[in-house]
Image (cartoon, rainbow, N blue to C red):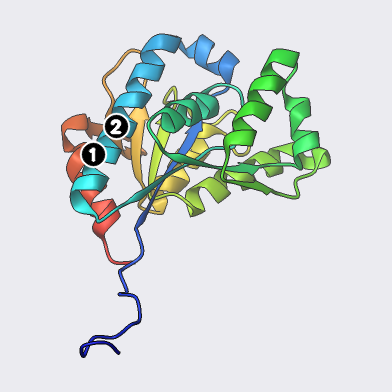
Amino acid sequence: MIGGMSSQPAEYPPPTLVRVGVTGHRTKGLSQAGYNPEVLSQSVREVLTQVKKVAQDALSEPLLRVVSPLAEGADRVVAEEALALGYSLQSPLPFPRHEYERDFSTPESRVIFNTLLGRASEVVELAGSRNDANAAYEAVGRWVLLHSDILIAIWNGKPAAGQGGTGQIVQEALAERIATVWVRPHDPISLIKSTNPLSSVSIDQLSEVIRRALTAPS
């Protein structure tokens, strides 16, 4: 000790991690649902910007993370916008990465996938099997939920077309009381309250919902 003061470094509380997950349609599904790519990116950017602002206002030195499996479509839109805003990227994959690449039919898509994967701070390769691919997609969707405080759902509002589909993941998010932000093709951004019946509330309530999600005791 020098002058009655400890030489040990002061201890500060660790930064709070703020995790934003994504569920949503792939490129073909987005097109069929009428999503405009530029409008979609703008809407996602708006949500992520608001999460960042609320987190910085409510928490001391928050760490911002987006959780995305990087499938074509919604996953990549959210990952790209989040990285541009300074979020880190965590990527759970339904299969080992070399197997997952088979989901992407064009060389350009595989390049984008590997570029984004290279920017991820953590990659988690789940042990999914092509013999039961739907179960693998369901497992990665649930992994996203398990590691998310807030979920962005880029969803047409319809029931899931198959096991692990967007509609199913949204239902499970609400059952787990995860704040779920709904980005739709032709309607304002809103917060999903229920899927049975399907209902939502104005985006005006987003800031308070985010604040509660980030400051609630664990």
Q: Quadrant of residue 95?
A: top right
Residue density around tag 2, few if under 14, some if 14–19, many if 20 or more, within 10 Å = some
Q: Is residue 118 visible?
A: yes
Q: Which residue is mark 1?
A: 53
Q: Secondary structure at mark 1?
A: helix
The amino acid type, in three-letter code, at marker 1 is Lys
187 left or right, relative to 21: left
Above or below 120: residue 73: above
Callout 2–callout 1 Cβ contact below 8 Å: yes
Q: Which residue is mark 2?
A: 49
Q: Residue 8: x percent and y percent? A: 35, 81
Q: Quadrant of the C terminus?
A: bottom left
Residue density around tag 1, few if under 14, some if 14–19, many if 20 or more, within 10 Å = few
Q: Quadrant of residue 196?
A: top left
- Disc number placed over residue 131 in the picture, else none: none
Q: Residue at x 57, y 34 (%)?
A: 165
Q: Residue 71: x percent and y percent? A: 61, 28
Q: Residue at x 36, y 21 (%)?
A: 184
Q: Quadrant of the N terminus?
A: bottom left
Q: Quadrant of residue 36?
A: top left
